[in-house]
Image: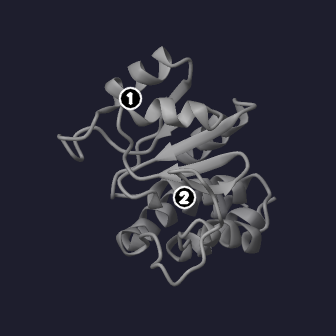
Amino acid sequence: MKIRSALLPIALSIITVGCSAATATDSSVPLEETKSMFRKINDKIGVSPQITLDQINDAKAEGVTLIVNNRPDGEDPAAPQSADIEAAAKAAGLDYVAIPISHSGFSAPQVDAMIAALDSTKGKTLAYCRSGTRSTLLWSLAQAKSGMAPEEIARLAGNAGYDITPVRAMVDVLAAGQ
């Protein structure tokens, strides 16, 4: 147990090196049918590439009550930054949490923050980053730590068009720790 806990931060940051290759899968993967502009992982969460300020009202219309920003400020200076999205979300009556994930990797506190964010809302969550991949991978780690079976995590992410292979080993480790 102590070794697993000590290795978690190291493993999470090493695994992220492969995340740039874990973009949304190609169109040959059957995506779950949805009318949403966001990719549905399950009834509680959807993921998205960078959202615009205009899309916040679209998210609210789809039942989103929480927006989770997994994109660090400055990654794309032309994109709306965290404060802009937060202000627009709050103006629309939505909760907002920033859990930025840089290309240097995931950390145990980020996984715990995602668990807390998901547990804090009774409605739907929309998590976004540049492509939706980091949001999906962070969701995967959070679900594994919360006890969801790795096969189910992989299936749900795959239905949304995302491959969890870069974090699959850590998903298995976190799920086994339950």
Image-quadrant location for residue 64 = top right
Foreground residue among 148 and 90: 90
Residue most extreme to the front: 35
Tell me where residue 105 sits by quadrant.
bottom left
* Image depth: mark 2 or mark 1 in front: 1
Q: Do tag 2 and tag 1 residues touch (Cβ < 8 Å)? A: no
Of residues 27 and 119, the one nearer the viewer is 27
> Residue 136, which numbered label?
2
Q: Residue at x 46, y 61 (%)?
A: 133
Assign the C terminus to one quadrant of the image. bottom right
Residue bearing the label numbered 1: 85
Q: Residue 139, percent across and down?
A: 60, 54
Image height check: is 132 above or below 56? below
Whole-percent x and y of residue 118?
67, 39
Q: Position of 23 compared to 79: left or right?
A: right
Q: Is residue 34 visible?
A: yes
Q: Position of residue 39 (x, y in %)?
A: 55, 56
Residue 42, position as x, y percentages in the image: 71, 55
Q: Earlier in the sequence, mark 2 or mark 1?
A: 1
CA distance separating discs 2 and 1:
19 Å
Judged from the image, the secondary structure of the residue bearing numbered disc 2 is helix
